[in-house]
Image: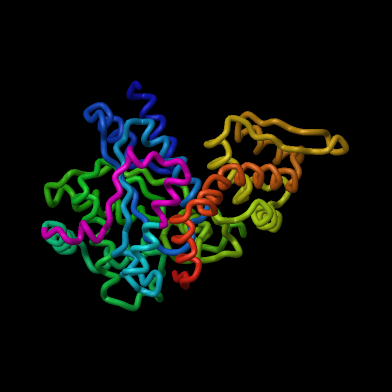
Amino acid sequence: MDIETRFALIKGVGEEVITDEELRQLLETNARPVAYDGFEPSGAAHLPFGVFRPLLLKDMLKAGVHFKLYLADWFAWINNKMGGDLEKIRKVGEYFIEVWRAAGVDMNKVDMIWASDVAAQREYWKRVVLIAKNTSVSRATRCLTIMGRKAGEMMETAQYFYPMMQTADIFQLDVDITQLGIDQRRANVLAREVAPKLGWKKPVVVSHHMLMGLQGVKEPDGYDVNAARDAEISSKMSKSKPQTCIYVHDSAAEINKKIGGAFCEAKNVTNNPMLDYTKHIVFRAFKMMHVERSAKFGGPLEFASYAEVEQAFLDGKLHPLDLKNAVAESLDKLIAPVREHFEKDKRAKELYEFVKCHEITR
């Protein structure tokens, strides 16, 4: 595969790339760059984690990137996920692995790494201290939002370790590309800032889109000084908010019910979760989008691109209910293999039952 095709695949994954020039140069000089994404094991898998993330990962692998999936158990511990019980967090991490396997991730092409194993390395903590010594208190405080928490929710000194540790991960894992969500941007930018000071490799940042929750756009909640980015992070689909979230264990009926109650204002193509899923999931997974419609309302429709769907919706030629039905059908096709794996595989089922019976905490 030529460099421009690889570049286009990786850039297509990112809502923001820092920078295009550095990414192209990396591909020109490195036939197999290393990228990573980190995940706090906490609660049942939802649409962004169990469907969207695997779709992005497939494109990264197709582009010849060696990917490291980082199970951030220590980070979930610091963030008081699963009640701050590290043993429970580790078990949820095992459940995460089953989700990726069920979603079609080729586990032979990725490295599974636990944060607790990295934390056992002496060199890692030296990196954490060096980064902390090169980061002001105010800068570290601004980075705390990568935990998904606002200033008023910060109650423990340990939480200040979080951004220093996440930044150290990048160098300890020896990655060329940080390929996380846009909500993790601050830690990745911090890594780029301290790298030249410490003589370490500066990573390229490829930040992916945050899928919107079913409620649509929310008022900015103080996660970022950039208003648009703050609104995106504040409005993202969160697995700790079941009423605005689709899980990979939801039945077809549950998906239809949730989608049916979602925000989808006629002719409104701004901050519309149905269009968001159409653009970032449906047309990433399928070449066409079929809209079933009775002859009374014009008969079935076929769309070959997201742009066609958006224009039809804007013009009023595609009704919100018809769009919702088409999105629900497409999402169920992608979720079904994951849902069925956890229904049929004994070990997977046991892990999901464990996750379900324990309190999900933010």
**Residue 292, image x, y percentages:** 75, 38
Span highlighted in magenta in the image: 95-122
**Residue 124, image x, y percentages:** 16, 58
Image position of 82 with respect to 297: above or below: below
Q: Front-most of 323 and 353?
A: 353
- Residue 227 visible from this viewpoint: no
Residue 161 occupies quadrant: bottom left
Which residue corresponds to the image point at 60% horizontal and 45% vertical from the top-left? 331
- Left or right of 352? Residue 78 is left
Q: Front-most of 143 and 346?
A: 346
| Residue sitting at the far bottom | 155
**Residue 203, image x, y percentages:** 25, 44
Q: Front-most of 61 and 227?
A: 61
Which image quadrant: the N terminus?
A: top left
- Left or right of 178? Residue 223 is right
Which residue corresponds to the image point at 34% horizontal and 53% vertical from the top-left? 38
| Residue sitting at the far front | 346
| Residue sitting at the far right | 296
Which residue corresponds to the image point at 39% horizontal and 46% vertical from the top-left? 207
Q: Front-most of 224 and 303?
A: 303
- Looking at the rendered structure, the number of numbered marks drawn on it comes to 0
- Residue 359 visible from this viewpoint: yes
Is residue 113 within the magenta segment?
yes
**Residue 188, image x, y percentages:** 30, 51
Image position of 241 with respect to 181: above or below: below
